[in-house]
């Protein structure tokens, strides 16, 4: 009995040590990015990246905040499309998954195959661009940043698989009591889907928060730039100015392009890091249940 306890203790020590090492390896890159953003450009170019600023400097943040109004506008646009897109996308994803889950829906397998088919083939960039502009008229519209990411077949199938774990007796009994399909979905199924909603919602929100591609295709109005696209444009401009300064004999070190990238990373991921701890507890249950059931 004592030998078993010692083995269990040794196993726990080894397991916690391995987890601690893996966690440390995950945290170190973020610490290096944070430290690099507060390091002078000269020190980064000379000494490389480290866990602590060798020469403390806030020049990179000063370069980003030269126009705080544009940064705040971009933050506002990103928050708007992230919140709106996540709520709408999550509801549509759950509702579509519910339709595919209901055995009474005669064509559910055909629709499931249709969703799966779109993960393998699509019309291509040209067709997508023409449809968005010519038929949907989404040039310079915030809808162009929201609509394309509303539904993902991958998330629909995960949500449908999660719903398969819900006993059929629950919606059937509610139907006998006279509840409509929408009532069954909103009053019974949605509360049971909290782990899947939290985990899928986090992925949808990250997709909106990190997206810059839709803005590059459809947005020309600077007041509608999302955060990631504005940071992308800023890096491009700094690299262009650095290149032009080098050609004209101006010391390029005056333009902190490397540390600016790190500072922009810190600025852009800050809210995501704050939100993640509140939903990460649902990840294991939400994703594993959705992945195992066939």
Image: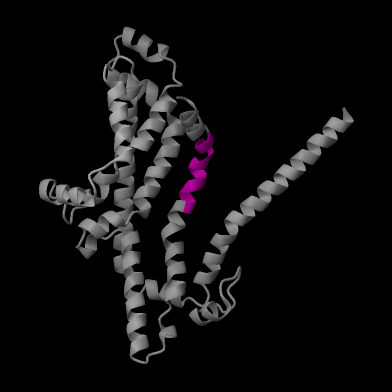
158 vs 220, left or right, is: right
206 vs 11, left or right, is: left
Instruction: Indicate whether residue 283 is drawn in magenta.
Output: yes
Q: Which range is magenta?
A: 273-284
Please tell me how many numbered marks the rendered image carries.
0
- The answer to which of 244 and 33 lies nearer the viewer is 244
- Residue drawn at the location 42% of the way across and 22% of the way down: 164
- In this view, which residue lies farthest toward the left? 134
- In this view, which residue lies farthest toward the front? 121
- Residue drawn at the location 27% of the way across and 54% of the way down: 214
Judge whether 262 appears above or below 83 on screen.
below
* Image quadrant where residue 93 sits: top left
126 vs 31, left or right, is: left
Kindly tell me whether residue 18 is visible in this rendering.
yes
Q: Quadrant of the C terminus?
A: top left
- Residue drawn at the location 71% of the way across and 45% of the way down: 16
Considering the whole magenta stretch, tell me its main secondary structure: helix
Kindly tell me whether residue 92 is visible in this rendering.
no
* Image quadrant where residue 60 sits: bottom left
Instruction: Indicate whether residue 57 is drawn in magenta.
Output: no
Residue 179 at x, y percent in the picture? 30, 14
């Amino acid at each position: 009995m004592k030998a078993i306890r010692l083995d269990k203790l040794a196993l726990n020590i080894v397991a916690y040590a391995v987890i601690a090492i893996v966690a440390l390896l995950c945290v170190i890159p973020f610490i290096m990015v944070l430290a690099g953003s507060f390091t002078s450009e000269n020190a980064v170019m000379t000494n490389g990246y480290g866990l602590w600023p060798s020469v403390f400097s806030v020049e990179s943040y000063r370069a980003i905040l030269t126009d705080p109004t544009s940064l705040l506008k971009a933050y506002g646009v990103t928050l708007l499309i992230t919140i709106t897109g996540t709520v709408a996308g999550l509801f549509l994803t759950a509702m579509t998954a519910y339709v595919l889950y209901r055995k009474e829906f005669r064509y559910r397998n055909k629709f499931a195959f249709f969703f799966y088919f779109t993960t393998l083939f699509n019309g291509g960039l040209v067709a997508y661009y023409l449809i968005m502009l010519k038929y949907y008229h989404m040039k310079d519209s915030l809808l162009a940043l929201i609509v394309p990411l509303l539904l993902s077949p991958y998330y629909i199938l995960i949500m449908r698989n999660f719903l398969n774990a819900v006993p059929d007796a629950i919606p059937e009994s509610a139907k006998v009591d006279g509840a409509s399909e929408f009532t069954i979905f909103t009053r019974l199924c949605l509360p049971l889907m909290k782990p899947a909603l939290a985990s899928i919602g986090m992925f949808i929100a990250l997709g909106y928060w990190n997206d810059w591609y839709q803005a590059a295709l459809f947005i020309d109005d600077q007041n509608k730039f999302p955060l990631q696209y504005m940071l992308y444009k800023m890096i491009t401009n700094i690299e262009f100015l650095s290149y032009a300064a080098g050609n004209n004999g101006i010391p390029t070190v005056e333009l902190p392009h490397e540390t600016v990238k790190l500072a922009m990373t810190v600025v852009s991921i800050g809210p995501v890091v704050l939100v993640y701890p509140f939903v990460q507890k649902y990840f294991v249950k939400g994703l594993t249940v959705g992945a195992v059931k066939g």
